[in-house]
Amino acid sequence: MKTYLYDGSFTGFMTLIYWTFKDKLRPAKIFKKADYSGDLFSETVGIETDGELADKVIKSAKDKLSARVFRKAYYAYLSEFPGIELAIFDYLYLGFAYKANLQKNWTDCSVLEVKKAARKVSRERHRYKGLLRFRELDDGILYGPYKPDYNISSLLAPHFAARLTGEQWIIHDTGRNLATIYNGKSWLEISDDLLPGLEFSEEETDYQKIWQEFFRSIAIDERYNPELQANFIPYKYRDYLLEFENQVRRQ
Amino acid sequence: MGQIDTQKKVEILAEAAKYDVSCSSSGSSRANQKGGIGNAAPSGICHSWSADGRCISLLKLLFSNDCIYDCAYCINRASNHKPRASFTAEEVAKLTINFYKRNYIEGLFLSSAVFLNPDYTMEQLVKTLMILRNQHKFNGYIHVKAIPGADYRLIRQAGELADRMSVNIELPSRESLKSLAPQKKATDILRPMEQIGTDLIEYKEDKKKFKSTPDFVPAGHTTQLIVGVSPEKDYQILKLSEGLYSRFNLKRVYYSAFMPVEPDKRLPAVSGPPLLREHRLYQADWLLRFYNFEADELLGPGRPDFNLDYDPKLDWALNNMDKFPVEINKAGYWQLLRVPGIGPTSARRIISARKEARLSADNLKKLGSVLKRAKYFILCDGKYLAGIPFDPELIRSRVDRDYKGKNQQLSLFADTDNDRRQVIS
């Protein structure tokens, strides 16, 4: 039984899948190199990330298992749950080796774990399609800071690229210190210490005020129900939401 | 300066629009075009939730609240002393674009009071939509009202630009309409609904032949009924909805619990909105649209109102115990759907999972069924799971017990006292 280590990227993880499947070896544990502190008893194998081998795995997963099954694995990976890599290994192994129909399988543990993680990531992605708020900077760039539980920026970027095609924008994951920037043509992920200074445009504060006013006016006082509101929009999401800034309830 | 002015108008005209409940942004898959901004997501996206717990998806505004009509239930009626304001088409378009690119909203919901006359009002709405779609190349979601009494050509024009349209019936019978909204004619409301319903089908047919045919309200059309302002029973309201779905090809009927906006001697005295009654109507509406129920199965002349203690499906099941228990490993989709605690998602999963392996009670829970409610009504591989004999009386008392505890915890739709006390004289 060996412990496998990879560089922490999805490409690295897919390379790991390639070698372990090829050697028909189930890892005892899988760790990102940075997270592994080592222990006395287990033998470790370090995986060298290889883009071509990773692509091979991705392509055959999409072809042989279906794009949907692969997407679940990718989404589950983005959850960054401890131990999720091993569940994804089992999930894919079940699909490749036993030709099991993963979409219809609702009883196997690893399948359930992957599906559950994927569902959580997918829900958060959907949620932030609505909850991300952009601020307009003085050079016209739209800046959207947020702090998601899962690593979903790469899932949100295509959504906003299709929608705000002609704009330039930044999606800033303040928890992971990652910035996804879009220049009007394509997007890429960078570390957030490379971000320029952030100054609001002249109109920005006005629009924030109008939005806050709209948010207050649209609520019906006779139906005031903050518990219901909190069910839909828990407090952890409110830090970056302009409409919840200095919100005072109107009498 | 312009911004301050806009802010004041938003305050007045959002306030005036808030009693329209529809805020859905689903059902349209309009794509972005070159040089344009926005697209529509078929699932719809909620952007925030206001202090009353309702979803905010669209920038919901009245174009104007300066109404010529004097409908008793309405906050904007002519005799009500309220500040009045009107937007310009350019103003609404600019605000929409600026909100949209900051991702505050999914699109625009534009309604209006009738100012000057219905045609002029509708023209202003169409003008706003044209500026948005043509000048700004906006491809986000637009929901627009058809103004009753306006020339249908204007309404059709709006339908080619919008994703969804609606005409609000508000009062569920001709008699109520006559007494509470004397200037509105029932035919003025129903005719455009019927025409939109017909056009929906015709445009779709045309599009099959000619690719250049524009989309016509791709997300369908809807209406709204006010609950508790007039003496109609739940049965009458539900029958009306059923008729609207089948005759006018309607996507949805919204229900709005009446709240007294200003005292008026024509209105019933109520202490608060009948929220639980509204909730039951929505539940029943879902049963009509997704569960293949008919209004007459749920209610009848002898039982015209919903039981406020249980949801309509559980209530139906308790009154139809001869149709249970149902074997999970055999029952068809529609039969599974009728089991309390099993919805479309878990019914679909049950059917797909049992092809792989027979289902045990343990599996069933993993598939997401609410076993706590379902257990009284199902067999799993021949085994009855409730732990009591299958006896309708006993089951009713157990369900009662389960439910009572739950209702007390569930404060979302509380206000049962108001619901009960509301007697219309």
Image: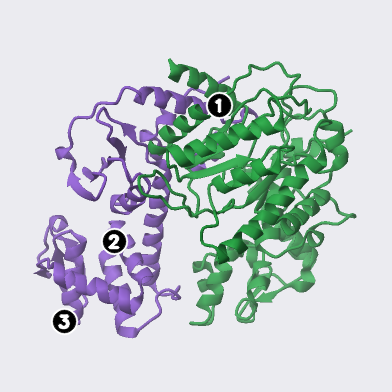
Chain colours: A purple, B green
Whether labels 3 and 1 belong to a single chain: the reply is yes
Give residue A30's position: percent from left, percent from top. Answer: 20, 66
Instruction: Please report the residue visible at 73 percent of the width from the left and 19 percent of the height from the top.
Output: B80
Q: Residue A74 vs residue B204: left or right?
A: left
Relative depth, front residue between B142 and B135? B135
Q: Tag on residue A59? A: none
Q: Secondary structure at mark 3?
A: loop
Crowding at label 3, few (<14), some or many (≥20) Cα neighbours within 10 Å? few
Crowding at label 1, few (<14), some or many (≥20) Cα neighbours within 10 Å? many
**Figure check: B14 above or below B216:** above
Q: What's under tag 3, amino acid-wise?
A: Asp
For the residues labelled 2 and 3, the Cα–Cα distance comes to 22 Å
First in sequence: mark 2 vs mark 3: 3
Instruction: Please report the residue visible at 38 percent of the width from the left and 81 percent of the height from the top.
Output: A100
Q: What's under tag 1, amino acid-wise?
A: Ser
Q: Tag on residue A23? A: 3
Please state which of the two labelled residues, at mark 3 or mark 1, is closer to the viewer.
Answer: 1
Instruction: Please report the residue visible at 85 percent of the width from the left and 27 percent of the height from the top.
Output: B266
Give residue B124's position: percent from left, percent from top. Answer: 60, 31
Instruction: For the C terminus of chain A, give its image quadrant.
Output: top right
Give residue A94's position: percent from left, percent from top. Answer: 33, 79
Q: Tag on residue A77? A: 2
Instruction: For the N terminus of chain A, give its image quadrant.
Output: bottom left
Residue that label 1 marks: A217
